[in-house]
Image (cartoon, helix red, strand yellow):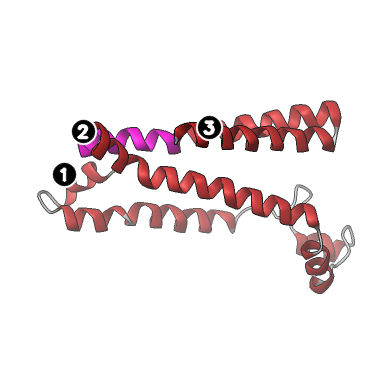
Amino acid sequence: VFLAVRDSFAPGDDDAAWRLCFWLPALLHFGTGLATLTGRDLPDGNVDELELSGAKQKSRSDVVLKVGFSNLNGWLLCVLYGMSFGVELTVTNEAATYFFEYHGLSVKLAGALASCFGLMNLFARSLGGIASDWLGKRFGMPGRIWSLWISQALEGVFCCLLG
C-alpha cells in the first residue's frame, strides 16, 4: 500500500506518503461502521423490534454485566486471546526489522515477507474455528477446550523454537 500511495500521491516524499497510508484503513473503518448501521442485531431481527413484539424479554444491563463479568470461562478466553494476539503483534512488528537487519533483505522485500505472517491469519484463524467446531461436534465443550489447548500449546512450542 505504501509504495502505491507514494508513487500516486506523494512521489519522492516518504514522510507524506506514510501519513497518507493511514487514510485507507481509516476510510475502511468508517465505511464498515456505516455498514453496521444497516445490519441486524440477531438472526431473528433487531433487539428493539423483538422486544416491542414480545418475542424477546427486555434485559437489565446490570444483570447482563454481572453475569458476563462473573463468567470465568470468558475471563480465561480473554487472557488467552490477549496472549496469543500479543505474540502475533510482536512478531508482526519485529519481522520486517529482523529480515532487514539479520538477513540483509531490502526494506521492500522484508516488509512483504513480514506481511505474509499477518496474511497467514486469514486462513489460520478460520482453520482454528473449523477445528474447534469439528471437535465440538464430536466431543462437546471438552472438544473445544482441547482444540484451544492444543493450538495454544503448539503456538508456545513454535515460539520457543523460533527463539
Residue situated in front as seen by the camera: 85 or 25: 85
Tell me which amino acid carries mark 2. Answer: Gly
Query: What residue sits 22% from the left and 39% below the top?
Result: 107
> Would you name the residue on which mark 3 appears?
158
Residue situated in front as seen by the camera: 114 or 58: 114
User: Where does the image place residue 138, in percent across and percent down from the top left?
Assistant: 84, 25
* Mark 2 or 1, nearer chain start: 1
Q: Nearer the viewer, mark 2 or mark 1?
A: 2
> In the rendered structure, are the residues bearing label 2 and label 1 in contact, judged by CB atoms less than 8 Å apart?
no
Tell me which amino acid carries mark 1. Answer: Asp
Query: What residue sits 81% from the left and 63% below the top?
Result: 70
Residue 74 location, quadrant: bottom right
> Would residue 132 be found to the left or right of residue 84 on screen?
right
> In the rendered structure, are the residues bearing label 3 and label 2 in contact, judged by CB atoms less than 8 Å apart?
no
> Would residue 129 be found to the left or right of residue 51 on screen?
left
* Mark 3 or 2, nearer chain start: 2
User: Where does the image place residue 98, in percent across and percent down from the top left?
Assistant: 31, 39
Q: CA distance from mark 2 to mark 1?
A: 25 Å
Residue situated in front as seen by the camera: 53 or 162: 162
**Residue 114 belongs to magenta span:** yes
Tell me which amino acid carries mark 3. Answer: Phe
> Would you name the residue on which mark 1 appears?
7
Query: What residue sits 45% from the left and 58% below the top?
Result: 30
Query: What residue sits 89% from the left and 64% below the top?
Result: 57
Q: Which residues are magenta?
A: 106-118
> Would you name the residue on which mark 2 appears?
104
User: Where does the image place residue 43, in percent across and percent down from the top left?
Assistant: 75, 47
Q: Residues within 10 Å of mark 3 (few under 14, many from 20)?
A: few
Q: Residues within 10 Å of mark 2 (few under 14, many from 20)?
A: few
Q: CA distance from mark 3 to mark 2?
A: 24 Å
Placement of 104 over or under 6, stated as above or below: above
> For numbered disc 3, what is the local secondary structure?
helix
